[in-house]
Image (tube, rainbow, N blue to C red):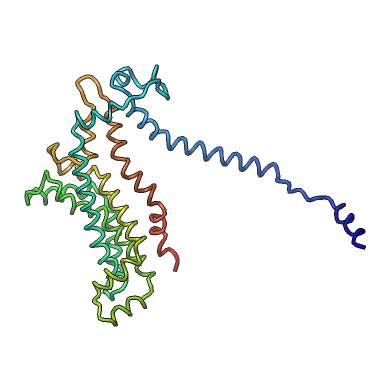
Amino acid sequence: MTSAVVPAVAARPARRSRVPARKVVRETLFYIAVVIVVLIALFPFYWILRTSLLSNSQVAAGVGGANGIIPSHLSGVAYSNVFTQGSFLRPLVNSIIVALATTVVTIVVASMAGYALARLRIRGAGAILGFILLAGFFPVLAMIGPLFLVLRSIGALNSIWPLIIVYLVYTLPIATWLLKNFFEQIPMELEDAALVDGATRLQVLRKVVVPVAVPAVFTAAILSFILAWNDFAFAVSFLTSTGHFTAPLAITTFGQSQFQTFYNLIDAAVVIISIPIALLVLFAQRRIVAGLTAGSFR
């Protein structure tokens, strides 16, 4: 009886999954479009890297012609000239100091402000948060004039230290909003247990809330560092001497001669200041995504 069943089962034709030709064409066109968009988006970055690897003689000969899309000869002389001729090390140090200090101040202030808005009963908390978000979207150029007058009146122009406070205009609104949303998702039982044990609100924030909110704090720190590192508008408005220039502002002084602009020096400096941001995003992308998506579901 078993031998009669086996041939019957074996005789059944195998089902073949057939994908409609229209679906194959649609997916193929989609991936082709994605590749085209990615290539268009990446081409400017490739061109900057390519130009930074040209010698001065190649730049003087022109970006087209013999150089082409892929130059026949690459050189790293522009990167050495940026530090030897352009004195780029000092602006880099200035940017590191300002960006790190701004990040630290932002995280401390935003953590306390976000926790207060999330947990304390504050009259008009919604209006305060709305004002913070409005300040974050306020045009930067509209604030340069009043800030310039204030810094001039107190004698704080042409110094990197006032930039630490000025850059809070960039960083504090988004960091406060991000941390406030994350703090609201932390179970209050953790805080209540610490309060019952005699901890103060600041101790609860420092020892209980912040360790739990590490992804959001890390994300706010990275975003604050990027915003402060990339600033050009405030730096060009408040700094006048090259010794106090930040890295983005110092780029404007590179590659200029009487008859020629050496774009390889400019692009080499652009690549150098882009490396820290690229490394941050590359190695911390999971934490950034976790922090940005925190609090999106309730």
- Which residue is located at x 33 percent, y 25 percent? 75
Question: What is the quadrant of residue 221 in the picture?
Answer: bottom left
**Residue at the image point whose x is 18% and y is 33% from the top:** 87
Left or right, 60 with reference to 1: left
> Quarter of the image containing the N terminus?
bottom right
Q: In front here: 253 or 273?
A: 273
Task: From the top left corner, tell me how far across and down residue 237 is, in percent.
Answer: 17, 42
Percent coordinates x, y for residue 133 in the rendering: 30, 59
Report the quarter where the C terminus lies: bottom left
Counting from the top left corner in percent of width and height, residue 142 is at 22, 49
In the picture shown, does residue 225 fall above or below 86?
A: below
Asked if 65 appears above or below 152 in the picture, the reply is above
The total number of labels drawn is 0
The image shows residue 127, relative to residue 85, as above or below, that is: below
**Which residue lies most toward the bottom here?**
196
What residue is at 42 percent from the left and 33 percent from the top? 43
User: Which residue is depicted at the point 73% across and 46% down?
Assistant: 18
Residue 91 drawn above or below residue 98: above
In this view, the residue in front, 18 or 14, is 14
Q: Quadrant of residue 123?
A: bottom left
**Residue 124 falls left or right of residue 41:** left
Residue 292 pos. (x, y %): 39, 58
